[in-house]
């Protein structure tokens, strides 16, 4: 069981994470390296040492961001891909086994409300396509709830214009080009690449999104047919679309040994392209967590798992989705489920 930590600037200290029952791994990143630069090995080593000193281990890097020029297929991509591969090599040299990354144009995960009040007095993240269409991006990303990468009006406009010609098929080509060059490096470095599905799993702001279902996972893993070319199974991202059969996706990918990391969280689907994040247990949302974990167990998944986003409970304030309390409850719930499944299956 692992837990995401935003580095020394995270309000949650590592010593608290160490106290969550059963959590041994930390998922983290170097948050102050500019996108497109090589991650210096001494900096990554220092991060791993800090985590180690707290009695934990850096088990996953989430994420080394992929530069927009790579996603756009611009000529500068070759140099940027070389640098990306160099960072992956550094991970391998330091024995960090898994890299979670994504290939979403411009925007990473997106919500329309970061603190939607729930009947029990907690707040949760939520998304509604109709609310998204009312967000005005003409002044940059300032109006987007919680959006961290700041783009001013002009650069956002230029970037969105550059994507006008990028159809889904072209984005797939650019992803294949990237993987053909990075996966062999990852393989020889002993690093497993684990793409994160697009969140939400449909196009937003007119930009293509391609990693949205099991078929996309399958297509991606066949571009470069190496065990180092795998996925992050994220129950919440994929679960926002009710037509995604989560246990079937786990069996399909996990059966081929391509699930390298699991993000577990629950969502309540509130309408077409609309959902609210729910507490982790199956009974409280639309994700059957028992079925997901059973499928992971059956297909031999023994890699890192983390409780994904939590609600804000018990008066906690902090980074939306990434407070301590609800995620810690998620970690113990997931371990309870896993223990039950393991005992029933006799392993
Ligand atoms: C959100 C996260 C994502 C994820 C990236 C992976 O909470 O799951 O931001 O880290 O998409 O590259």
Image: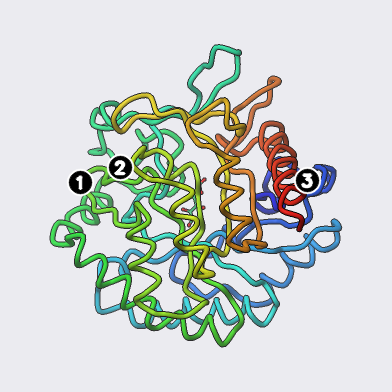
Q: Is residue 137 above or below residue 338?
A: above
Q: Residues within 10 Å of mark 2 (few under 14, many from 20)?
A: some
Marks 2 and 1, Cα distance to the nearest angstrom? 15 Å
Label 2: which residue?
A: 140
First of labels 2, 1 by sequence position: 2
Q: Are marks 2 and 1 in contact (CB under 8 Å)?
A: no
Tag count: 3
First of labels 3, 1 by sequence position: 3
Label 1: which residue?
A: 206
Label 2 beta carbon less than 8 Å to ligand 1: no
Q: Is residue 143 left or right of residue 87?
A: left
Label 3: which residue?
A: 17
First of labels 2, 3 by sequence position: 3
Q: Nearer the viewer, mark 2 or mark 1?
A: 1
Residue at 50% from the left image edge and 85% from the top image edge: 185
Residue at 71% from the left image edge and 64% from the top image edge: 47
Quadrant location of residue 76? bottom left
Q: Residues within 10 Å of mark 1 (few under 14, many from 20)?
A: few
Residue at 29% from the left image edge and 45% from the top image edge: 202
């Amino acid at each position: 069981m692992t837990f995401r930590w935003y580095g020394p600037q995270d309000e949650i200290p590592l010593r608290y994470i160490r106290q969550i029952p059963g959590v041994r791994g930390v998922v983290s990143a170097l948050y102050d390296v500019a996108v497109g630069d090589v991650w210096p090995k001494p900096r990554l080593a220092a991060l791993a040492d800090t985590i180690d000193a707290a009695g934990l281990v850096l088990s996953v890097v989430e994420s080394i961001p992929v530069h927009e020029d790579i996603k756009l297929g611009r000529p500068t991509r070759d140099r940027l891909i070389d640098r990306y591969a160099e960072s992956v090599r550094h991970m391998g040299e330091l024995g960090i086994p898994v890299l979670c990354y994504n290939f979403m144009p411009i925007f990473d995960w997106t919500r329309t409300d970061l603190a939607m009040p729930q009947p029990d007095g907690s707040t949760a993240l939520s998304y509604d396509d109709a609310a998204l269409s009312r967000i005005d991006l003409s002044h940059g990303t300032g109006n987007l709830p919680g959006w961290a990468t700041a783009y001013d009006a002009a650069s956002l406009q230029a970037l969105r214009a550059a994507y006008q010609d990028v159809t889904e098929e072209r984005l797939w080509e650019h992803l294949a080009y990237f993987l053909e060059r990075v996966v062999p490096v990852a393989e020889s470095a002993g690093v497993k690449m684990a793409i994160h599905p697009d969140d939400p799993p449909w196009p937003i702001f007119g930009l293509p999104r391609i990693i949205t279902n099991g078929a996309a996972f399958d297509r991606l893993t066949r571009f470069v047919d190496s065990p180092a070319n795998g996925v992050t199974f994220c129950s919440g991202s994929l679960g926002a679309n009710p037509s995604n059969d989560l246990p079937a996706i786990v069996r399909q990918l996990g059966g081929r040994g391509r699930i390298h990391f699991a993000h577990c969280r629950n969502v309540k689907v509130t309408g077409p392209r609309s959902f609210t994040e729910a507490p982790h247990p199956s009974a409280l949302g639309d994700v059957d967590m028992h079925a997901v974990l059973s499928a992971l167990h059956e297909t031999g998944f023994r890699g890192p798992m983390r409780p994904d986003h939590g609600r804000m409970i018990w008066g906690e304030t902090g980074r939306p989705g990434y407070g301590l309390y609800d995620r810690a409850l998620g970690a113990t719930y997931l371990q309870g489920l896993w223990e039950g499944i393991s005992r029933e299956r006799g392993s």
